[in-house]
Amino acid sequence: MAKLSFREALNQAMDEEMARDERVFLMGEEVGHYDGAYKVSQGLLAKYGERRVVDTPITELSFAGVGIGASMVGLRPIIEMMTFNFCILALDQIWNNAAKMRLMSGGQYNVPIVFRGPNGAAHMLSAQHSQATENWFCNVPGLKVVSPATPGDGKGLLKAAIRDDDPVIFLESEIMYNDVGEVPDAEDHVLALGKAHVVREGKDVTLIGYSHGLKAVVAAAEALAKDGIDAEVIDLRTLRPLDMETIARSVRKTHRVVTVEEGWPFGGIGAELAYRIQHALFEYLDAPVTRVTQLDMPMPYAENLEAACLPNARDVIAAARAVSYRT
Amino acid sequence: MAKTEQAATCDAEATEQVGREKLRGFLQQMQLIRRFEERAAREYASGRISGFCHLYIGQEGVAVGALGALEPRDHVITAYRDHGHALLRGCTPRAVMAELMGKVTGAARGRGGSMHMFNPEQRFHGGHGIVGGHIPLATGFAFASAYEQRGDVTLCFFGEGAMNQGAFYESLNLASLWNLPAVYVIENNQYAMGTPLSRASAISDLAMKATAFGMEGEVVDGMDVTLVNACIARAAKRAREEHRPTLIEARCYRFRGHSMSDPAKYRTKDEVDERKAHDPITLATHTLLERKWASEDEVKGWDDEAKDAAADAAEFAADSPQPSLSDLGRYVYAEPLSWRLDDAMTPHVREEG
């Protein structure tokens, strides 16, 4: 196992896939000469040249569409969104073209494209730069949505996303790029999309998280253990399609569920999970499914206000105790 | 800038350039599209076609002249008024009509409908319903051609209504910046649904916009199939050999409403009649007859063949089966969706019957 930062792990994934397949290229704002706004693409221009590491003007709609067009005729683009806040300008292309081309054509196109970049709140970036967009993308059939929580998963899932024949939204966390973690040395570390990962086994309550939100979940599980509550922690890894089998196996054991996300509550990931769990596993539940989310408001700037909006380990602990009737 | 005034026959110089054989072929293609669309209108009126249905009647000279200037390896994409382009790029009349009727034998297996005809085998990439939304895709095809140094060209059609969308400006900037082999053709049929150009665009000479991107721009009489052919041939050559994009405004006119539900009350009968005097089919017919490149009997015979093909398509489509319900979960992802009754995703899975 090598110790790599999240940034290095993602960089390695792209590097390996570009070396492996001439059809893979990277396109986006500042990905080349600037070496990436968050340095995820560092060194790729020097190695692969301007043909395969393509700097764009600030035109998210069109370079998203150029990538989709290129994927329809045989290339495998990686489109970097400097942040997913800016991807909102490209939503028409992603929703109407990437997600629907296969169906509209009666199955005559693959759309093997990855849109990747940082998603969610970082630190004091205010309302327009702090958005968690995953539930918007998850609403769209035709898209796959991935959001890794560790450098090792980041590498294995990004490689899988690049090799997938469907459009994949790959959501990274801006404040995790420096996180260091173990990355398997295996030549071809590829993780299956659509599979959740049981991070910690437990018997009393199931805590479901992903991406940066998983940190609060893991911290909460450790605190709960000291309090005699043995929590099982599931990292979703892929948000669409959801791995309901892994979730169901856990719920049948613990009978209690808390979902955790850093996005807004209305129609969120937790809302979908709660619906599916109560629908499929009602007889196993000993308490209503509870969700922990960002507060339902645009993100304010001030440090204390931002912290109050975002979910933290205390919120997760409180929710876990509530569903365990130990308040 | 090419000649824009209209004549009772096609432009003499362009006609010479196109030649007898090609012009005879162009007329037959235009006749097929015209008769097909008339038949589609009838089928729509009879209720066998539903949804939106935008007819190409009046604009045939643009697609026929333009696609006649391409090589088979070149890529073509257009907006929702796509039946004509589809017929020219290997979608059979049967496949297009079946798609209109939502049948599994359709050009998109009944998943697309009027606005989404496809034939990637002959590099016809749709058929798109969001105004201007396909212009970035075209730019992506051209990007891929440049990336793989294949030497093929992308021809992208859109209406003048799409030209005010941001997608247009962003795409043409990229195409020029990156030297992409693309030809962008504005089919200016004068009305974006019911809004005339004068109420939607600050300028009326649309090809001027090419200047803003540092690319060539050209205006062409879209009712004259020979002028369109010559114009697109120049632009395709520029794309193929010089790797430079071109913006072309093809001035044309649709004789029918925007869609089947549009009585077109925003324009006068006189205006439409005046335009019909310059019907692209009439111009090409007169040209062929005047030069004795075709006889009246031949022209009539081609027209009858077109009517027969349209009738055969309608019969075939009506007799074709709907898509199988058991295939409902296909074509969403590479792997078909498999729904189970205990899956919370679908509370309403129905048995086929």
Image: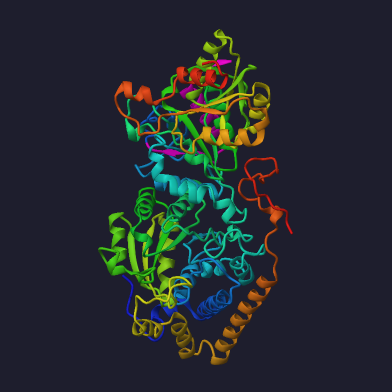
The x, y position of residue A179, in whole percent, is 46, 18
Q: Which residues are magenta?
A: A1-29
Q: Name the residue: 62% across, 42% down.
A: B345
Examine the rendering and report whether any part of residue B149 can be seen: no
Q: Name the residue: 59% across, 48% down.
A: A110
**Residue in front for this viewpoint, A255 or B36:** A255
**Residue in front for this viewpoint, A251 or B77:** A251
Residue B277 located within the stretch drawn in magenta: no
**Residue in front for this viewpoint, A176 or A290:** A290
The quadrant in which residue B162 appears is bottom left
- Outermost residue on the left side: it is B202
Q: Name the residue: 34% across, 81% down.
A: B268
The x, y position of residue B196, in whole percent, is 32, 70
Asked if B59 appears above or below A172 in the picture, the reply is: below
Residue B248 falls left or right of residue B310: left
The x, y position of residue A325, in whole percent, is 56, 19
The quadrant in which residue B302 appears is bottom right
Asked if A229 appears above or below B294 in the picture, the reply is: above
Residue A11 located within the stretch drawn in magenta: yes
- Outermost residue on the top side: it is A226
Quadrant occupied by the N terminus of chain A: top right
Asked if A54 appears above or below B156 in the picture, the reply is: above
Examine the rendering and report whether any part of residue A64 can be seen: yes
The x, y position of residue A273, in whole percent, is 57, 33
